Amino acid sequence: MYEMCVGPEKAGGALVWHVMAKQAAATLCGQRLRERIEASDGERARHCPDCMASFEKLMAVTPC
């Protein structure tokens, strides 16, 4: 299972939505999110392009 988490795109950067496996220590783009940010703070944030590309590849090869 995967979840969406709000965090900075790069250290100190704008907020984006990252994809993270439930028990993982890092997002699909390799970031370690140091603090939990409320989803409401990311309401208008875009999606992390690196996370979304990795997620798309995972879904293409993972059987249902």
Image (spheres, rainbow, N blue to C red):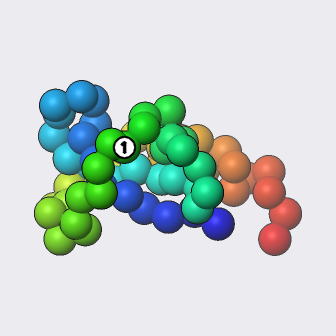
Q: Where is residue 18 in the image (x, y as percent from the top left)?
A: 40, 50
Q: What element does badge 1 sit on?
A: loop
The amino acid at mark 1 is: Leu
Horizontal and vertical percent for residue 35?
29, 50
The quarter of the rendered structure image containing the N terminus is bottom right
- In the picture, measured across the screen, residue 29 lies left or right of residue 43, that is right
- Examine the rendered structure and indicate whether residue 43 appears above or below residue 49: below
The residue positioned 84% from the left and 63% from the top of the image is 63
Residue shown at 50%/33% (left/top)?
Answer: 30
* Vertical comparison of 53 with 21: above or below: above
In the drawing, does residue 7 fall left or right of residue 19?
left
Return the residue at label 1.
33
Q: How crowded is mark 1: few (under 14 residues within 10 Å), some or many (20 or more)?
A: some
Q: Which residue is drawn at 16% across and 40% down?
A: 14
Tell me, yes or no, if residue 14 can be seen here: yes
Reply above or below: 10 against 16. above
Residue that protrudes farthest toward the top in the picture: 11
Q: Can residue 55 be seen in this view?
A: no
Using residue 59 as the reference point, say whether residue 7 is left or right of it: left
